[in-house]
Image (spheres, helix red, strand yellow):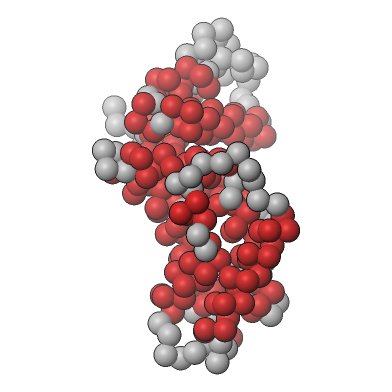
Amino acid sequence: MKITAANAEALQEQDCPEGAANDSPDSPCYGKAAGRPRAADKEARRQALLHTAATLFLEKGYSKVSLEMIAREAHVAVRTIYVKFGGKSGLLNAVITNGREHFFAGMDNMETDTRPLQDILSDFSLRFLELISMPAFCSLHRMVVAEARTTPELAETFFKAGPQRTREELGRFFARPDIRAQLRSDLPVDTLPIFLINCIMGDIITRLLFPTEQTRSSEELRAQAKEGLDLFLRGVLR
């Protein structure tokens, strides 16, 4: 039977009929109390699965991790992963998206934020720098670069869930009439996100080629974000 989102609930009920419990780590009922789980319990199990997948991807490499391995470590059925995420690439997409959303959770929607342009971009710039400076992101980026040629789906999934989504969100922000009116009319809107990100990042990607145990302080990241944003604004404001 083809597994789709439409029949996900039915499959989960087959895997875990109400009132069932199973001590097998490969069962989706493993460690589950009798009865239908609460929304909070479902979300907790989802987060646990994403955490397990992320840990295995970063420790062993994307191509060396199988769904069976993830299912065994997370105490779920392989079919459950297919139902919820559609496979390994879908699971990686969820891992990246989940981490990104968690990191930017405290930031207002850029499409509706009424603060001055510079304040909005200042907030974004610092958060973005903090995100890409995290050890987990650095490890993820190195993994993608190392395996992109042999595992194209890895590079494509990473780009769509991370860089592409960031560019699209920034693009919608720069396209706002009130924001566009403050920018040089000769600059295409679709180039502004790339210009901003490059100004903020500086040589961080180059530094990823030389792993180090040292982490940059909050003061250093704040200074880089301010400097990069200032360079960007000097080039795009009317």
- Name the residue furthest right: 219
Q: Is residue 11 visible?
A: no
- Name the residue furthest top: 23
Q: Is residue 191 left or right of residue 73?
A: left
In the depicted view, which residue is nearer to us: 5 or 120? 120
The quarter of the displayed image where residue 113 is located: bottom right
Q: Is residue 189 left or right of residue 41?
A: left
Residue 238 position within the rendered picture, expressed as x and y whole percent measured from the top left: 55, 92
The answer to whether 37 is drawn above or below residue 189 in the figure is above
The answer to whether 4 is drawn above or below residue 33 in the figure is below
Name the residue rendered at 44%, 69% in the picture.
194
In the depicted view, which residue is nearer to us: 2 or 89? 89
Q: Is residue 201 visible?
A: yes
Q: Is residue 135 left or right of residue 122?
A: left
In the depicted view, which residue is nearer to us: 114 or 166? 166
In the depicted view, which residue is nearer to us: 208 or 98? 208
Name the residue rendered at 41%, 39% in the picture.
143
The answer to whether 139 is drawn above or below residue 227 in the figure is above
Name the residue rendered at 48%, 45% in the picture.
210
Number of marks drawn? 0
Residue 173 position within the rendered picture, expressed as x and y whole percent measured from the top left: 54, 74
Residue 77 position within the rendered picture, expressed as x and y whole percent measured from the top left: 45, 20
Name the residue rendered at 61%, 18% in the picture.
32
The quarter of the displayed image where residue 1 is located: top left
Residue 95 position within the rendered picture, expressed as x and y whole percent measured from the top left: 50, 40
The answer to whether 184 is drawn above or below residue 25 in the figure is below
